[in-house]
Amino acid sequence: MTRALTLVLLVACSPAEEETPVALPTIWGVETLADEDPAEDVVEVSLTAIQDRTYIDGVASPMWSYNYLVPGPLIQARVGDTVRVNLTNELAEPTTVHWHGLRIDNAMDGVPAVQDPVQPGGTFTYEFVVPDSGTFWYHPHVRGHEQVERGLQGSMVIHEEDVLPYDVERYFVLDDILLDGSNQVMGGFTPVGGMTAMHGRLGNTLMFNGKFDPLEDEVRSGTRERWRIVNTSNARTLSIDVADARWQVIAIDGNLLPAPMAGEGPIRLEVGRRFDLEVLPVDGAELQVVVPTTDGEAAYPAFQGTLVDEGEPPEFLFTQGPAAPVMEEVQQELTVTLDATSGPNGVEFTINGLHYGEGDAIPVAANTPTRIIIEETTGLEHPFHLHGQFFQLVSREVGGPFMPGSLDTLLVDPGERVELYTDFSNPGRWMAHCHILEHAETGMMTEFDVQ
Ligand code: C2O
Ligand code: CU
């Protein structure tokens, strides 16, 4: 009787099962938000921005958080899905959520230019279709220098239609935080002045997925892993390296590369940048964060994999990605000058001589091959970030690494002139700014009006 019933159920289920796409992988390292919408192509999640009741690693804080988690929870979906995020603001100040790197509908970009910030006690529903797969992240775009530093930053993975079959996927949020002697986030966010204005808020403590000690797990020598890595620091340029494993870079800023980049570290992971690595454990697999010191550089382990020997490492899975978009003959040219002025609290950063809000948005023709020239004039480095579009690096001068493929962030070195290419395929009012959040806060942001 029981057996017959089972058979009937199996038969009844099988047609539906055939249509169910491969389940999304479980991603190690961050907590994943459960999908509240049963529809297959809709992912609905809820985020609450909370002030004061979150503690990281047992000691530091109190932090601000999404859903009591630092870093905030992972949102994952499949390319083409509709993502709906119900935000509740329990902070004592306004906030928004910006989806860093996603080329979505402009109205959902989560910046004050397109939405009134969500007031304390208020709610807002973000809903958009995700056009690109890749590794992304999200964070507030109101007083980001304080809200992000205190912990409001979450991860986002949009999977390829045919999920690349890695045995293990891990997400690493690398951050540096400035703590005082009793493990409290240092105050003094407003006004942004002095050295904090000059170099951004450099931390004194590295955090790996919200932990101060290296993360640990077993790794298996016969397997292939995909590591998704983001630098969410307010200002600190990090470099990463991998030890005890064979590795290669397969994606930058979410986009799979036309061909993998050989794993020769350290590689520069500027603020906002994402790298996807393919890692084949050999003697283990260690992710290192490399930072400059007074006498060279120091490598801190962020993740230490203990080897379980299951045989020879396989060949790399990723050998080729989609071709880079073809660069067509340029029909418009924009110059973005990164400059500075002085104000009552010290240096203030500007773009084309203007603080954010002082000028009109820069008019740009949509779907037009465009050269963007960035000229750094302050003698400092600035991670330039463009919303809503990808760009390609055409040339650079100072010797920072060449980054292939489609990008949304690029560190411009002191005094450098960089040439970028984009076709502005996504219309709307899109921000461009320095991702050193203190530089952005003092004025180094502008808008492109893409029509
Ligand atoms: Cu990561 Cu304007 O943002
Ligand atoms: Cu800057």
Image: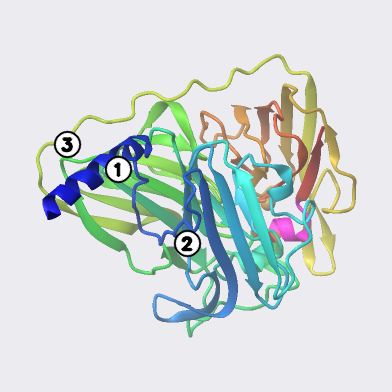
Residue span colored magenta: 439-444
At x 30%, y 43%, the residue is 13
Q: Is residue 81 left or right of residue 194?
A: left
Which one is in front, 410 or 92? 92
Is 37 contained in the magenta span? no
Label 1, residues with CA under 10 Å away: few <14, some 14-19, many ≥20: few
User: Element type at marker 1?
Assistant: helix
Q: Between marks 2 and 3, how big is the CA–CA gap?
A: 32 Å
Q: Position of residue 178 (x, y in %)?
A: 54, 71
Label 3, residues with CA under 10 Å away: few <14, some 14-19, many ≥20: some
Tag 3 residue:
313
Residues at circles 1 and 3 in contact by the CB criterion of under 8 Å: no
Label 2, residues with CA under 10 Å away: few <14, some 14-19, many ≥20: many
At x 29%, y 30%, the residue is 317
Tag 1 residue:
13
At x 79%, y 60%, the residue is 116
- In the picture, residue 147 is in which quadrant? bottom right
